[in-house]
Amino acid sequence: MLELKGLKKTYKQGRTSINAVDGLDLRIDDGELVAIVGPSGSGKTTLLQLISGLDRPSSGTIHLDDIELTSLSERRLTKVRGESIGFVFQQFNLIPTMTASENVQAAMAPFGLKAAERKERAQSLLAEVGLEDRAGHLPTQMSGGEQQRVAIARALSNDPKLVFADEPTGNLDSETGAEIIELLSNLSKERGQTVIIVTHDTAVAEATPRIVRMKDGKLSL
Amino acid sequence: MFFLTYLRRELSRRLGRTIFTVLGFAVGVGLVVAIAALTSGLEDAQGEILNPLGSIGTDLSVTRPVVATTQDAQAGQGGQGGPGGFGLGAGPSDGIFIGERPGGGGAGGLSGEDQAALIAENQSVITDLSKLGESGDQFVHDYFLPADQLTFPEDDLAQVEQVEGVAYVAKGLTLLAVHQEGTVPEIVAEIETGGEEMEIVRDFSPPTEAERSQMRECFQRGQQHGSSGDFSVGGCVPQRLLSFRETITTPRRTIREALNPPETDIQSDPYVIAGVDTTNSEIGLVTESQVAEGKYFGRDEDETKDAILAASYASRKGLDIGSTIDLNGTIFEVVGLAQPPVGGQAADVYLPLTDLQELSNREGRANILLVRADDSSVVEEVSANIESTVTGASVTSAADLAGRISGSLVDASKLSDRLGAVLQVIGLAFVFIMGSLLTLSSIAKRVRELGTLKAIGWGQGLVVRQVVLESLVLALIGGIIGVAIGAGVAYGVAAYTPPLEVTAASVGSPAGSFFGLGDVGTEEVSATVDIVAPLDFNIMIMAIGLALLGGLIAGAIGALRAARLRPADALRNLG
Ligand SMILES: Nc1ncnc2c1ncn2[C@@H]1O[C@H](COP(=O)(O)OP(=O)(O)OP(=O)(O)O)[C@@H](O)[C@H]1O
Ligand SMILES: [Mg+2]
């Protein structure tokens, strides 16, 4: 269970300050598949970064089960991210010098698995996203859709409670995008993971059971 | 170990960056290693060649230059005319070291015995032609001229040995000799000589080539017109070489001298002869190791007396090992040819000390002491001790001699002393800065990647370790390649640098020249040295170490800067 209370993030840009997230309350239950939609600049990415512990709010609290993320040290927060949270980015953000398999293994690296076990798990995750024959490919040797699948396999590698995806289809054509969304929603159902997707795509949003709309850093209906 | 896989991937799959960074380190390290090698190569060459005393096993040489010890030391006093003579001082202002002041109060500051010895030395200059044979006879004779350095009395020798810090003393006698051959002239007169007051004269600056040949001619002319009675050997010495020092009165005696000799074919040829203390073959005016060809004294079984010649003198005279030379009736066999060190004690002919002492009427006397100190660190001290213990002693050290040596090696060496240090510092700074900049810039390009790693659970420590490890490996590879480059450059430069030249006036007597005649009969000694560039292990380690330090510091700074960013900020980075 994820619960946000009075969450606020203020960016100061010289004299002006922007409330990118402006006193937001939200509760997301385990296993939910949620789409966050809203106009550009409404604070979707900012919200996602706060919930996932990539950034810290100006005020408010974030409870992930009984852990309050804003009170954690950087070290603990990193650990929570590694163990409980998976990310899928719009730009994929794969490590360019690593093969598909190695990119997946990179997320397991901090947890001291044996090399063989790591490889095996990476291989089965790649199989889950349909890339069993691309394990040895470098990112540059794969299509955008394939790269995003590798990123999803990486996000799942530690079997996280939460998976965040910020515009995962933004750099893909609509057909490929639909495949990616389907992949994410299937994973959510099969693994019981909470999946939160930020998107512009109304088609994507309509495919999800719950839609959270944002405007000017606040929830809107 | 995943981080090793990652490291390998980073190095091999960003080959361009890897090569660029490695080269950056390598160029810096190579520069430092090459400069260090060349600098120390020049230093070695200098140390080896420019240490003439060292090459004769000596730390110091002690001589006794003529020093004015009396109030009578007035220059110019010598030229008072008077009955000339074919020999000591005569004619207006041409006395070499004899002043003709009537009366004369003996030589101030010298002991009676010492005085007698000095007079005996000087007498040999007098050419009593009647002793050479009947007129018309062919004669060959070698005159041993008194050097500008007085001989030491036995006491002084003993004293020097007693000086604290002195490990060993070898004696030596170096003299200027004039070889004459020709026909004994006919008209001979008896002349009373002696009673003159002798002023010992010297001038330290050696004669020029022109003056030298003038003197040689003058000797010649003197033999031909000597009967007029106003010729003296001293008359041939340019005025500027004359100055006044010491006064001694010569004993009265009668010599027979040629008056108006007919034109003869008398040839004069000056050369430097040295008497070598053969007690220890490693220290002396010539040492066993300097004998380039043949043997050192006393190494053969035969009874003949041994002589060693300077190789250059031998070739000029057409002499070789096995040749004999006749010095006033004593036959010497040439047993060895010596290569004198640059700036060292160069003579043309070397004889065992006792033989030369006998030939030149200087039994028991020596005019140069070669001193080996207990330890190189006490050389300065020993030098001062000797100077204060032995009156009138002049001590010359290797450092003094080095100053007289010139040539491209010295220039290069001076240059490298000054420039080498600067260039090394620049090189080391280059290693450090270049390495740091390359490392920092490559990290800056990876902020987003490092942010991603943090987002997926890599802690700051892991990220920093990864980046630092990477830059250390780059620095190490760069350092090793740099050492190879540096060694190659040093070797190449050394191999293609033309041999450097060293030149020094050969030092017949360390404190100056002979008899105001300088290095008559000997030549400027030149040598060429091939520069080798020995690799300095410490410098290589230091350069690699500095490359590693640059990599470490830059890696750590860059990594920390990237790793401390919140992932949100790092991910926003567009790099
Ligand atoms: N690091 C930052 N510094 C200052 N202002 C920022 C920063 N990040 C975001 N903002 C501002 O906060 C607001 C919300 O930005 P955010 O990226 O969350 O919007 P978004 O809803 O994700 O937009 P889009 O749909 O275009 O991605 C915007 O006005 C943006 O300019
Ligand atoms: Mg956004």
Image (cartoon, rainbow, N blue to C red):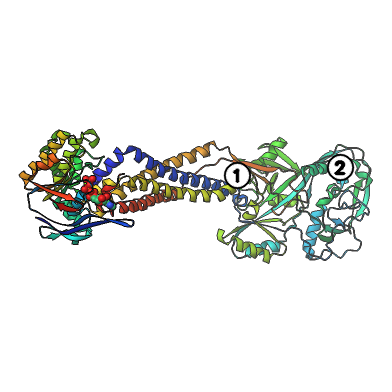
Q: Which mark is residue B133?
A: 2
Q: Residue B83, relative to residue B264: is it above or below?
A: below
Tell me which residue sits at (43%, 49%) in the image: B433
Instruction: Give whichever of discs 1 and 2 has the lower sequence position.
Output: 2
Give how far across and how far down residue B259 sits, in percent: 94, 45
Which of B364/B214 is in front?
B214
Tell me which residue sits at (40%, 45%) in the image: B25
Q: Residue A200, relative to residue A82: is it above or below?
A: above
Which of A68/B91 is in front?
A68
Note whether ligand 1 is within 8 Å of mark 1. no
Give how far across and how far down residue B197 sits, in percent: 87, 60
Give how far across and how far down residue A212 sits, in percent: 12, 49
**Residue found at the very far front of the displayed protein:** A221
Identity, as a three-letter code, of the amino acid under mark 1: Leu
Image quadrant containing the N terminus of chain A: bottom left
Q: Which mark is residue B147?
A: none
Using the rendered image of the protein, determine whether residue B294 is visible from the camera's viewpoint. no
At label 2, counting other C-alpha atoms closer than 10 Å, the crowd grade (few under 14, some 14-19, many 20 or more) is: few
Say which residue label 1 marks. B409
Using the rendered image of the protein, determine whether residue A31 is visible from the camera's viewpoint. yes
C-alpha gap between disc 1 and disc 2: 53 Å
**Chain ID of residue with mark 1:** B
